[in-house]
Image (tube, grey):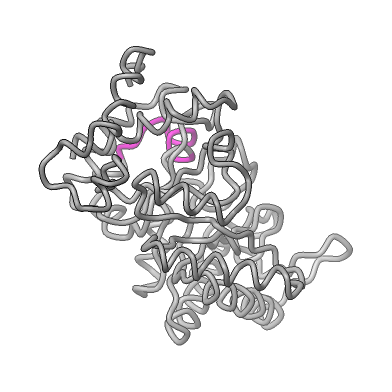
């Protein structure tokens, strides 16, 4: 996309301070001087973005996001499946309570996107000591992960989480692996349905994550088609799709589009903020909005330079994206 220069950023940043003069602002917006976003751009707790002006405190970051006009957040906790202390559980509850109080919609959490083992593709339970290939064992493992995930999602007030089939298995044919993936995803989707949650398959590019089985949006959508469950959707990561395929043409594939639950944002190739790479985000966000998407777009990117000035520039960039819809 065309780079925004310093003058553009200063001008766009000033839009916030002048927002109170714009007709149609709510009292809260007028009081704060910042117009609320229309698009659900969703920054997260652990993101590098806005680190200088928002700080690292997770609760203060949520308040900062609200004050800047964001209406959604995602990834506000890490789900590692390790035993949690009472303090960690309380922080998760506090984050969920604050997000609800602030009126911030809480999007997906990364939980089961395996990057090192052929879990679903080969029914392999993750282990560095020995290979265990057993359908019953992998199902028990998946249920254990989902139960952990659901407990955390309940505390933070989210209904969605990220899932993945794992890596390619060298000993099985691709078709056999695909069948295994669909069977395991269908099992997980059924368990999600019984518990009131939605899982999002996130295709990952094989440059950043070698040997991933699900490496593009069209394959993720095909899996969803065969799983045949509203509880199995895809997370369309703009960076991963651009890196793997070289374009975002799959947004115009009706099968892909109907299965998209949310988006992730990062520029390619550096995976930093929009404008740091070669992707046309202004055009992409306009397309996404015009096609009727009203869900969450997670800020899944780093920040090229950590400074208050760059923080403000990124805020101005997102406000410019939002202003066009």
SS majority, magenta: helix
Based on the picture, tell me whether residue 267 belongs to the magenta stretch.
Answer: no
Return the x and y of residue 212 as percentages of the image width and height: 60, 49
Residue pushed farthest bottom?
194
Q: In which quarter of the image is the N terminus?
A: top left
Return the x and y of residue 127 as percentages of the image width and height: 81, 64
Return the x and y of residue 44 as percentages of the image width and height: 52, 50
Report the residue at 67% width, 60% height from top: 118
Q: In which quarter of the image is the C terminus?
A: top left
Above/below status of 285 relative to 66? above
Report the residue at 69% width, 76% height from top: 141
| Towards the viewer: 276 or 310 | 310
Above/below status of 263 relative to 165? above
Based on the picture, tell me whether residue 243 belongs to the magenta stretch.
Answer: yes
Q: In this view, does 119 lie to the left or right of 262?
A: right
Return the x and y of residue 234 as percentages of the image width and height: 41, 58
Is residue 251 in view from this perspective?
yes
Residue pushed farthest right?
129
Report the residue at 65% width, 72% height from top: 90
Above/below status of 218 relative to 194? above
Is residue 217 in view from this perspective?
no
Residue pushed farthest front?
31
Q: In this view, does 206 lie to the left or right of 294?
A: right
- The magenta segment: 240-249
Report the residue at 47% width, 47% height from top: 64
Above/below status of 302 relative to 202? above
């Amino acid at each position: 996309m065309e780079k925004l220069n310093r003058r553009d950023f200063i001008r766009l940043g000033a839009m916030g301070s002048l927002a109170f003069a714009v007709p149609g602002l709510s009292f809260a917006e007028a009081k704060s001087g910042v117009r609320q976003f229309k698009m659900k751009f969703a920054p997260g707790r652990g993101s590098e973005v806005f680190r200088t002006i928002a700080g690292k405190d997770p609760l203060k970051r949520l308040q900062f996001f609200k004050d800047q006009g964001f209406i959604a957040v995602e990834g506000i906790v890490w789900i590692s499946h390790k035993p949690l202390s009472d303090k960690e559980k309380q922080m998760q509850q506090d984050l969920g309570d604050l997000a609800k109080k602030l009126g911030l919609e809480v999007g997906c959490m990364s939980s089961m996107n395996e990057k090192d083992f052929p879990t679903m593709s080969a029914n392999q339970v993750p282990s560095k000591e020995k290979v265990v290939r057993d359908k019953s064992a992998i199902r028990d493992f998946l249920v254990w992960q989902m139960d952990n995930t659901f407990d955390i999602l309940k505390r933070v007030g989210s209904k969605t989480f990220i899932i993945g089939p794992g890596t390619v298995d060298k000993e099985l044919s691709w078709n056999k692996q695909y069948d295994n993936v669909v069977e395991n995803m269908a099992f997980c989707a059924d368990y999600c349905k019984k518990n009131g949650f939605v899982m999002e398959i996130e295709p990952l590019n094989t440059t950043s994550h070698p040997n991933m089985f699900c490496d593009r949006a069209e394959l993720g959508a095909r899996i969803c088609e065969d799983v045949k469950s509203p509880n199995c959707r895809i997370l369309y990561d703009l960076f991963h799709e651009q890196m793997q395929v070289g374009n975002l043409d799959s947004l115009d594939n009706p099968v892909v589009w109907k299965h998209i639950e949310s988006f992730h944002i990062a520029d390619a190739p550096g995976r930093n903020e929009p404008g740091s790479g070669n992707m046309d985000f202004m055009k992409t966000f306009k397309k996404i909005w015009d096609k009727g998407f009203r869900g969450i777009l997670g800020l899944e990117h780093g920040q090229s330079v950590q400074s208050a000035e760059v923080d403000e520039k990124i805020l101005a960039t997102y406000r410019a994206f939002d202003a066009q819809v």
